Image (cartoon, rainbow, N blue to C red):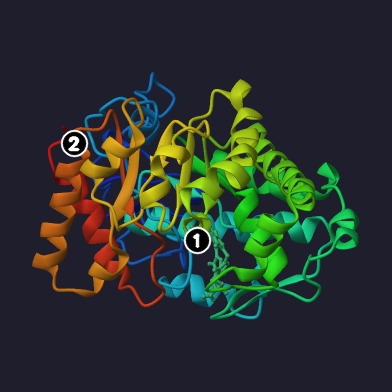
């Protein structure tokens, strides 16, 4: 079941039938006597009925997020949040009740609804597919679960030559749910871009080898340093998973692709360059023919930014540790940046948040393009009203 009412977001943007976001110009004055269909007030915004003709199909300027990702400075600074769909939203928690995370990720209608929730609520400039980096592993038949408060956990970690050899190829037929979800979403979203994503080979390998989250990644590093032949076989397979997962989303209409190498920051630059970069490069190269802007993001990657920028993505995601101005000198010219407000600052008082947002915007103003985001995912305890306020503030600031 999808959204079916017309709503107006806090920034005055109209959200049409089935949650399709519209540009502000299409929202006319309220029509007396009209009312939204009963029982369909799906978020805290008050429902309004636009009366002007739907002009969505007239010639459209490029969505700000796509302009920024292509290295231009749109009139409005685009903003979205990593992990914007999820436990910070009461409507998410309500809708997810009784459905396991990985089951939810494979239900196209539920994926559509959960992906749209933060777009409707916050008025962000992009949706990110509701999924998880381990979904390709599930499709490949690997026994993985997501445990609340822990993360992905595997019953049979991959540690030996036999384990690696036994990893199945990813069957495209198993990705029908993904194709359906993305097609539905693109239809619902109208001009708002959908970001598709995948986990990078290293981060997926870290989960497979450790069997779950790890602080030191000791087993992963032991295999990487000690068994380069096995490492190559494993990362080659995982690069294939990421490629197929990303290409499937792009083919169905995702207009931006992000590769999450969340745990790459665990590595020294020399090891990253030798054991990780070639495989991430392979993934990005496999998308070269797609004319879809690509984002490369990792956490704790301050020392790796120069290398990560060589992997083939246009946009480099920066975590909160490195100011955007410094990040730009590390990644070199020509790359738009994404980031990088500290997610924890959202728990401070508003004046503190506002000053920090302005600082990030100021620091990003010298990049060829800037997509405002957090420096990592939204923390579950975050007040969603604060996120909406950040969106409003970013949109109100003069774009450089
Ligand atoms: O960003 C979005 O809103 C889209 C959805 C998304 C999820 N996971 C949903 C999710 C995305 C882009 C991811 C990516 C992901 N998953 C990454 C890369 C990004 C990052 O955070 O570095 C990683 C490392 C994972 C693995 C993973 N899955 C972790 C660490 C967790 C958190 C475990 C916990 O409970 O603290 C998950 C679970 C997960 N993925 C949830 C959501 C909404 C929470 C599960 C739930 O709501 O039941």
Q: Earlier in the sequence, mark 2 or mark 1?
A: 1
Relative to residue 24, is residue 384 depicted above or below? below
Relative to residue 19, is residue 57 depicted above or below? above
In front: label 2 or label 1: 1
* Callout 2: SS: loop
What residue would you read off at disc 2? 365
Q: Nearer the viewer, residue 375 or 172?
A: 375
The image quarter containing residue 274 is top right
**From where the camera sits, is residue 106 visible?**
no
Q: Nearer the viewer, residue 351 or 45?
A: 351
Q: Quadrant of ligand 1?
A: bottom right
Q: Residue at x 19, y 33 (%)?
A: 366
Q: Give how far apart the Cα atoms at labels 2 and 1 are.
A: 29 Å
Residue 309 left/right relative to 344: right
What residue would you read off at disc 1? 266
**Residue 85 picture location, percent across and down:** 47, 62
Question: Which quadrant, please, contains the C terminus?
Answer: top left
* Callout 1: SS: helix
Relative to residue 97, is residue 50 depicted above or below? above
- In the image, is the residue at mark 2 within 8 Å of ligand 1 by its beta carbon? no
Q: Residue at x 42, y 56 (%)?
A: 82
**Residue 170 picture location, percent across and down:** 82, 47
Could you classify mark 2 by the number of other residues whose Cα lies within 10 Å: few (under 14), some (14-19), or many (20 or more)? some
């Amino acid at each position: 079941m999808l959204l079916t009412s017309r709503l107006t977001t806090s920034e005055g943007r109209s959200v049409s039938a089935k949650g399709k976001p519209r540009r502000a110009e299409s929202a006319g004055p309220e029509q007396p006597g009209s009312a939204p269909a009963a029982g369909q007030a799906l978020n805290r915004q008050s429902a309004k009925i636009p009366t002007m003709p739907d002009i969505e199909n007239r010639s459209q300027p490029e969505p700000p997020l796509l302009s920024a990702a292509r290295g231009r400075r749109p009139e409005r600074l685009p903003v979205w949040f990593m992990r914007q769909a999820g436990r910070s939203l009461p409507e998410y928690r309500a809708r997810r009740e009784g459905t396991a995370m990985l089951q939810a990720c494979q239900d196209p209608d539920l994926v559509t609804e959960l992906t749209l929730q933060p777009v409707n609520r916050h008025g962000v400039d992009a949706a990110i597919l509701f999924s998880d980096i381990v979904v390709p592993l599930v499709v490949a038949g690997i026994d993985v679960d997501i445990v609340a408060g822990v993360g992905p956990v595997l019953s049979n970690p991959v540690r030996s030559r036999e384990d690696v050899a036994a990893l199945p190829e990813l069957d495209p037929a198993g990705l029908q749910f993904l194709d359906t979800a993305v097609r539905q979403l693109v239809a619902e979203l109208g001009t708002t871009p959908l970001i598709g994503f995948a986990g990078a080979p290293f981060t997926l390998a870290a989960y497979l080898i450790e069997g779950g989250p790890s602080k030191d990644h000791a087993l992963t590093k032991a295999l990487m340093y000690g068994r380069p032949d096995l490492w190559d076989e494993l990362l080659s397979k995982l690069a294939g998973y990421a490629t197929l997962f990303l290409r499937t989303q792009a083919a169905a209409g995702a207009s931006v692709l992000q590769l999450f190498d969340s745990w790459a920051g665990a590595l020294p630059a020399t090891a990253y360059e030798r054991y990780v970069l070639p495989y991430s490069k392979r993934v990005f190269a496999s998308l070269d023919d797609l004319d879809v802007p690509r984002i490369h993001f990792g956490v704790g990657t301050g020392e790796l930014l120069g290398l990560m920028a060589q992997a083939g993505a246009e946009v480099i995601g920066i975590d909160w540790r490195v100011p955007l101005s410094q990040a730009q000198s590390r990644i070199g010219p020509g790359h738009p940046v994404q980031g990088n407000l500290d997610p924890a600052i959202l728990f401070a008082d508003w004046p503190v948040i506002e000053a920090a947002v302005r600082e990030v915007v100021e620091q990003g103003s010298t990049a060829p393009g800037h997509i405002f985001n957090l420096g990592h995912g939204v923390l579950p305890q975050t007040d969603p009203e604060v996120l909406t306020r950040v969106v409003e503030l970013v949109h109100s600031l003069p774009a450089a």
